[in-house]
Image (cartoon, rainbow, N blue to C red):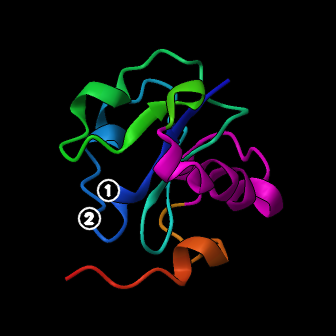
Amino acid sequence: MTYIVTEPCVDILDKACIEECPVDCIYEGGRMMYINPDECVDCGACEPVCPVEAIFFEEDVPEEHSEYTAANFEFFADIGSPGGASKIGRTDFDPPFVRNRPVRV
């Protein structure tokens, strides 16, 4: 199991979760953050600091945000587990489901 970032994060990218994560497993895509399921230790430190309440334990993702679980895993399909987000930095990649969302202004 892992934590999943959902719709409220799209186009917000607050990054408080990154600062709180003790294992550097939260990666920045073009429009939102993603939690690496292989690197996450399920500590939950990221969840309470998210100002838009976008982070849920995988089993607790609300039904209306269920497609974000697949998007999270798709984000890591190509990069795998590089051993920390700071090694990669920000990317412009988002899975099509996220990339094609209406832009929030």
Residue 78 is inside the magenta segment: yes
Q: Amino acid at mark 2?
A: Ile
Report the side of 65 relative to 75 (left or right): left
Residue drawn at x 22%, y 47% is 52
Residue drawn at x 23%, y 32% is 49
Q: Which residue is mark 2?
A: 12
- Residue 56 drawn above or below residue 99: above
Alpha-carbon distance for marks 2 and 1?
A: 7 Å
Q: Amino acid at mark 1?
A: Pro
Instruction: Estimate the x, y position of residue 48 in percent, counting from the top left.
Output: 26, 26
- Residue 13 drawn above or below residue 82: below
Report the side of 10 relative to 38 (left or right): left
Q: Which residue is mark 1?
A: 8
Residue 9 occupies which quadrant of the picture? bottom left
Q: Residues within 10 Å of mark 1 (few under 14, many from 20)?
A: some
Q: Main secondary structure of the magenta part?
A: helix
Instruction: Estimate the x, y position of residue 25 in percent, counting from the top left.
Output: 55, 38
Q: Quadrant of the N terminus?
A: top right
Cβ–Cβ under 8 Å for marks 2 and 1: yes
Frontmost of labels 2 and 1 is 1
- Residue 67 drawn above or below residue 102: above
Taking the image as drawn, is residue 31 in sight? yes
Instruction: Estimate the x, y position of residue 44 in percent, counting from the top left.
Output: 42, 19
Q: Which residues are magenta?
A: 62-88
Taking the image as drawn, is residue 94 in sight? no
Instruction: Classify mark 1: helix, strand or loop.
Output: helix
